[in-house]
Amino acid sequence: MAYATVRETLPLILEEFAASHGGRRPDLIVHIGIASPRPYYSVETLAHRDDYNITDVEGRSGYLDGEKRWRELGLPPILTPGCVTDDPTSASPYQPDEHFLDTWQSFAPESDLRLSKDAGHYLCDFIFYTSMSLALLEGHDRNVLFLHVPGASEDANIEQGRVVTLALIKTMVSCWLDEKRPV
């Protein structure tokens, strides 16, 4: 995949969704990528604006398609899931924390689940930042997560990935939509 493809395609996917759902954005967004060296599942807790120096399939770094544009738009160096308003009566997305992790583990108790602050400064991190920056620029909640999965591809691994992903979605609903968190 290429940085330019992410930059061009992600807004189109969101526009297509909105067009077919009365102008609404998705309530929750989960991006999934493979982190081959990791033997565990991890939810990324932050995304980086800068330092996409690893070249993509087109031999380009992420500077022109990401960092340069984001800096020109005045976007911050780090984005995390979050809400646009400070309304304490409204449940909303927040940066995954220990409570979020505990809830996720309760839905998938046999899995090695972790929180991560290192999405890798490559395409996974780029997708995560792109997705959250689009929400921020449009004034929407950053109801976005990135799930890194191990690279194993046996049937049992695929089934475990399904269980973990469903558990993550349940956690997002439980923690971000159902709970009223104190400020």
Image (spheres, rainbow, N blue to C red):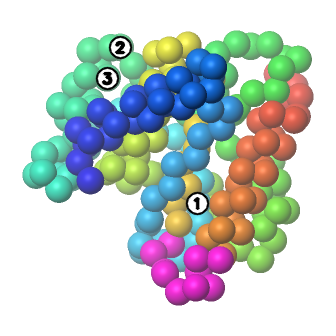
The crowding category of the residue bearing disc 3, from other C-alpha atoms within 10 Å (few below 14, some 14 to 19, many at least 20), is: some
Is 166 drawn above or below residue 85 in the view shown? below
Residue at image coords 23%, 48%: 2
Label 1, label 3: how far apart the Cα atoms are: 26 Å
Q: Point out the stretch of residues depicted in magenta.
A: 150-159
54 w.r.t. 26: above or below = below
**Residue 124 percent across, percent down from the top left:** 40, 51
Could you tell me the amino acid type at mark 1? Answer: Ser
Quadrant where the image shows the C terminus = top right
Q: Is residue 78 visible?
A: no
Instruction: Name the residue that disc number 1 marks.
Output: 42
Q: Residue furthest front?
A: 20
Q: Nearer the viewer, residue 162 or 132?
A: 162
Q: Which residue, given by chain and number where applicable, does mark 3 sit on? A: 70
Residue that mark 2 sits on = 74
Identify the residue at image location x=27%, y=30%: 67
Q: Secondary structure at mark 2?
A: loop
- Cα distance between the residues tagged 2 and 3: 6 Å
